Image (cartoon, helix red, strand yellow):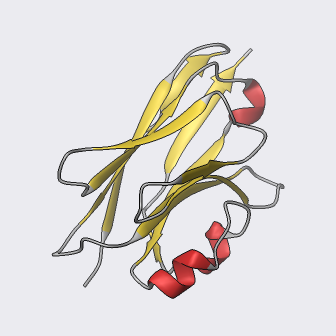
Amino acid sequence: QVQLEESGGGSVQSGGSLTLSCTVSGAIYNYCMGWFRQAPGNEREGVALIHSDNSTTYADSVKGRFTISQDNAEKTKYLQMNSLKPEDTAMYYCAADLNLLVCSATTVHDLGTHLKYRGQGAQVTVSS
């Protein structure tokens, strides 16, 4: 059984930084993972995606401000969020999939609907 344990988030002022983490349980070594966010009344928005070859893609809205990294065991991914803006306020969810065919067909824009497994979500609130 695959489980994603998500942590991090919180409240910061505009320009601040936060880090989200997402840990995959089980003997899983090849997978893709990403984060999407959703604010009340808004559509789901993919923000960052990392593939099993460690290639990354970012939504234009966060490019240059958000960065995905991982621990040496590659079981935990981190989403470092810098220069946060009030419009970044949302619930953030990590998502992952073990099916590399699904991963190869997934873009940062549709990861929220394509990837099978989800974390429990973490609230990010940025005040102006």
Residue at (68% x, 67% y) in the render: 107
Task: Please tell me in which quadrant of the rendered image residue 82 appears.
Answer: top right
Image position of 96 with respect to 40: above or below: below
Image coordinates of residue 94 in percent, x first then y, are 48, 58
Q: Which image quarter is the C terminus in? A: top right
Image coordinates of residue 62 in percent, x first then y, are 70, 36
Residue at (57% x, 77% y) in the render: 104
Image coordinates of residue 6 in percent, x first then y, are 37, 53
Image position of 11 with respect to 31: above or below: above
Task: Please tell me in which quadrant of the rendered image residue 3 appears.
Answer: bottom left
Instruction: Give whichever of 108, 88 is nearer the camera.
Output: 108
Side of 118 relative to 111 (left or right): left
Residue at (73% x, 62% y) in the render: 109
Residue at (65% x, 23% y) in the render: 84
Image position of 6 with respect to 82: above or below: below
Q: Which image quarter is the N terminus in? A: bottom left
Count of numbered marks: 0
Image coordinates of residue 105 in percent, x first then y, are 64, 79
Task: Please tell me in which quadrant of the rendered image residue 32 appears.
Answer: bottom left
Image position of 53 with respect to 10: above or below: below
Side of 106 relative to 78 (left or right): right
